[in-house]
Amino acid sequence: MTDSVPPIVSIENLKAYEGELVTVQGWLYAKTGKGRLQFLQVRDGSGLCQAVVFKKNVSPEDFQAAKELTRESSLRVTGVVKADERAPGFPGGYEIDVRSLEPIQVAEPYPIAPKEHGVEFLMKHRHLWIRAPRQWAILRIRANITRALRYWLDEHGFVNVDTPILTPAAAEGTTTLFEIDYHGEPAYLAQTGQLYNEAAIFAFGRVYCFGPTFRAEKSKTRRHLQEFWMLEPEIAFCDLEELMEVQEQLISYVIQRILVENALELRLLERDLTHLERVRPPFPRLHYDDAVAMINRAAEAGEKVPGYDETVPPIQWGDDFGSPHETYLAAQFDRPVFVHHYPSQVKAFYMEPEPGRPEVCRSVDLLAPEGYGEITGGSERMSDPEKLVAAIQKHGLPLEPYQWYLDLRRYGSVVHSGFGLGLERTVAWICGLEHVRETIAFPRMLHYMRP
Ligand code: 4AD
Ligand code: MG
């Protein structure tokens, strides 16, 4: 063999090819230069690097082609890998001294300019926007969070059981149901996989489901999506305290792993890491009663909510927290805080009441620092069949679709608990994002369903 074809390498692996001739295939992110030099910023999905086209090193046709390349044109460049600390890009440190270049498709004028665009415009072009380095960083972190969550659960004896998306009954209140037509019968997109998880623990002990869940949320907030991904572990022979221990272990593991494995992405996002580095067990635990007292003391003293213009609003015992309350509470601690024993009246029907104090339930929400709010919600489940029937009726729900669920309390009922972690809110927190719309490739929001 005389002519050896240069290997096609990914930008993240350039460092292994220093001094060698390689080919990179990708897209043109940006271009500068004039006269005898063209600087191409090429991205290939694994990273971004500079490819330097020096007129004397390439054929006249290739030099002309480099000059005519437009943003987001697809191309192959072949050249020698050179170490250069100042070379722009990520992971950075290497550039390509180009010897030949092959445009694949010269792109039409690209609608997203390097300047600032409004949110509306970017959302409309989400199919293109996801190519931007910032979105790249966020979505890579998201993928790795998913990997880390699953890894920890798989390593700790949890069995992944997939739960249905087409369901016959409500599980998290009837106001946010997406109703569909199931061959003439009404059905609903799943708000949660929890009830099916509860069946599965009697077969496997510890399970989790992880999939898209749906809520027809009528209000526009920076924390709510219509379609979001929820990780839901469920555990037999587990009470509220053990449930909190599982959560703090899992979440600390994920954060510490992301800090190591996604340091580059976090740097691209200019994330302040001080809060994240502190996330280690144990997390503080705060009783709802004490949380209410804390809020009302702050309200009386006219304290401000961090990051808001307003002062802490007072709260009536029995009411659910608003975002300013959650933000204020979380700001009082140096790591995520568990708030437990919420009033039964603001929680779902299946939560176990506290013995001797049925107006509160054995529930727990985890509030993230820095104003990211509730990222998990969970509880001990009601294990007595009669109490459960009464709770279903009290919530105005029909009994018939829950008969199978009641069977779980008839055949070997045990104390059991579980929680749901909202993936998008977790991504927003870890990445330091203002809004959940950037945490998923194609967000479904109140007024956005396209693309
Ligand atoms: O508190 P939620 O409603 O709990 C449940 O659905 C339980 N069945 C979970 C369980 O115990 N297995 O939702 C859990 C989490 C919230 O803490 C929040 O992080 C997220 O899901 N979440 C949303 N995320 C984005 N958009 C929405 N509309 C969300 N609703 C809830
Ligand atoms: Mg909740």
Image (spheres, rainbow, N blue to C red):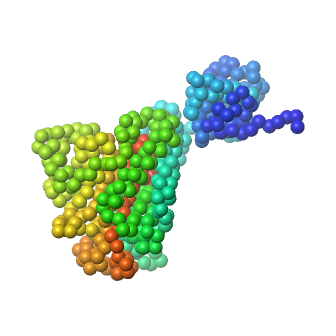
Residue at the left extreme? 300
Left or right of 289, for residue 259: right
Residue at 36% from the left image edge and 51% from the top image edge: 248
Left or right of 433, for residue 365: left
Residue 212 horizontal/vertical position (percent): 45, 60
Residue 236 horizontal/vertical position (percent): 38, 68
Image height of 209 relative to 82, above or below: below
Quick one: 246 or 52, which is closer to the camera?
A: 246
Residue at the right extreme? 1
Residue 339 horizontal/vertical position (percent): 26, 54
Quick one: 314 or 369, which is closer to the camera?
A: 369
Q: How many numbered markers are drawn? A: 0
Left or right of 378, for residue 444: right
Residue at 35% from the left image edge and 55% from the top image edge: 245
Residue at 24% from the left image edge and 46% from the top image edge: 329
Residue 366 horizontal/vertical position (percent): 32, 52
Instruction: State the quadrant of the N terminus.
Output: top right
Residue 350 in view of the camera:
no
Residue 234 in view of the camera:
yes
Image height of 431 relative to 176, above or below: above
Residue 449, image quadrant? bottom left
